[in-house]
Each structure stands twice: as C-alpha cells, then as structure tokens.
Image: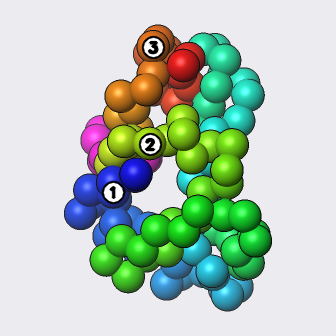
Amino acid sequence: MITLTPTALKAVSRFITGSADPVAGLRIHVQGGGCSGLQYGMKLEAEKADDDVTLELDGVTILVDPFSAPLLSGVTVDYVESLTGSGFKFENPNATGGCACGQSFSA
C-alpha cells in the first residue's frame, strides 16, 4: 500500500522518539484542499481509530483512514533535506495532476 524510504522511516522514528506524548503511530491522510484539490497530511496519533488500516514498516506503525486508503495506494513517501528546507515528499501513482510544491494533487 504505502512505502516509506529508509530516510523517511528514520525521520519518522526520530519524531516518534522525540514526542513527549505516547504515540500509537503516524497517520498519513488525504483531505480536500491545496491548489490541486487534495492535499497530504501527516501527524503523530495517540490512538488508533477502529476503522484504520494499519501497516507496520520497520517498527513504525502507519495509520490510514478508509477514505484516504485508495488514494494512497502505491504511494512512496521520502524525506528530503536541501538548502531550501526539509520535509516529506510524496510520489503518488494515482495522481492525475499536481502542483509545483508537491503537497497537493488531483485524482
């Protein structure tokens, strides 16, 4: 379903370890918005929802809601660091269009 590169897994593990609150997993979701209609979101979750799709990737729990699951199928998440900043980058084979920032897409 979703793939995280080794760099992304390392970054997520670092964020989870550094969290002051208990973490059940990393939620990756899609919501309306952005300049192309849909945008990606990520956040650390304290609890898993009953209807979440759960993935275990090298010790990291990924949580995906039922709405987002089909839109995230086949997505690769990377973590990039450059002179202009750092952050997560999504490569989505389901996207029919996107914006230059890489944070929103259309399906």
State which quarter of the image contains the C terminus.
top right
Looking at the picture, how far across and down is residue 42, in whole percent?
59, 53
Q: CA distance from mark 3 to mark 1?
A: 21 Å
SS at circle 3: loop
Looking at the picture, how far across and down is residue 44, in whole percent?
63, 68
What's the amino acid at mark 3?
Thr
In the image, residue 45 lies in the stretch drawn in magenta: no
What's the amino acid at mark 1?
Leu
Residue carrying label 3? 96
Residue carrying label 1? 4
SS at circle 1: strand
Q: Is residue 39 left or right of residue 83?
A: right
Q: How crowded is the residue under tag 1: few (<14 C-alpha within 10 Å), some, or many (20+)?
A: many
Q: Residue at x 49, y 74 (%)?
A: 61
SS at circle 2: loop
Nearer the camera: disc 2 or disc 1: 2
Residue interval drawn in magenta: 79-88
How many numbered badges does the structure rendering display? 3
Residue carrying label 2? 73
